[in-house]
Amino acid sequence: MVDVSILNFSVYSGLFLAAFLAATIVPMQSEAVLVGLLLTGDYPVAPLLAVASCGNILGAALNWLLGRSIERFRGRSWFPVRESRLNQAQSWYQRYGKWSLLLSWAPIIGDPLTVVAGVMREPFPQFLLIAGGAKVLRYLALTGLTLGWLR
């Protein structure tokens, strides 16, 4: 017999890890994990939303921290971003400012935006409020679509 508490811990831990990694520069998708768990009907919706949101927000916070410290390595041969791309990202962020973080939920552009917010020294409370809010709203919308709330 499988211990239900261990199974639940594994499910929620897996969801948290998927959401955390999906918010970093690691190519990962947490939406499929969340939708799969929602469709089973075996888990309450609120804890799934909370775990996915917390993981994704903490992943974005890690990106922000990396952004705060990464610029000192700019110009080194091993630096992962070309100088022109970093300048372009910074210019875009200066133009649209903190409100560009509303797109932090979006695939491809969202994760680099959270790193650039750190590079640009966006205050952490503002970063957390805007990026975190966008990420929670994305999971709420995904849940609504999955469960038919938005029909």
Image: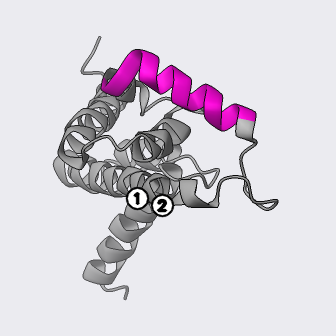
Return the residue nearer the eye: 60 or 138: 60
Q: Position of residue 111 (x, y in %)?
A: 51, 41
Name the outermost residue toward the top: 151
Q: Is residue 75 left or right of residue 97?
A: right
Q: Nearer the viewer, mark 2 or mark 1?
A: 2
Q: Position of residue 137 (x, y in %)?
A: 27, 30
Tag 2 and tag 1, C-beta contact below 8 Å: yes
Residue at (71, 46) in percent of width and height? 81
Within the image, what quadrant is residue 11 found in?
A: bottom left
Within the image, what quadrant is residue 107 found in?
A: top right
Q: Secondary structure at mark 1?
A: helix
| Magenta extent | 84-98
Distance between the alpha carbons at the discs numbered 2 and 1: 7 Å
Q: Amino acid at mark 2?
A: Ser
Q: Quarter of the image containing the N terminus? A: bottom left
Q: Quarter of the image containing the C terminus? A: top left
Residue at (64, 37) in percent of width and height? 86
Return the residue nearer the eye: 128 or 56: 128
How many residues crowd mark 2 within 10 Å: few (<14), some (14–19), many (20+)? Answer: few
Determine whether 117 is above or below 55 in the image.
Answer: above
Q: Amino acid at mark 1?
A: Leu
Residue ID for mark 2:
69
What coloring was used for the rendering? one colour
Residue ID for mark 1:
65
Determine whether 43 is above or below 88 in the image.
Answer: below
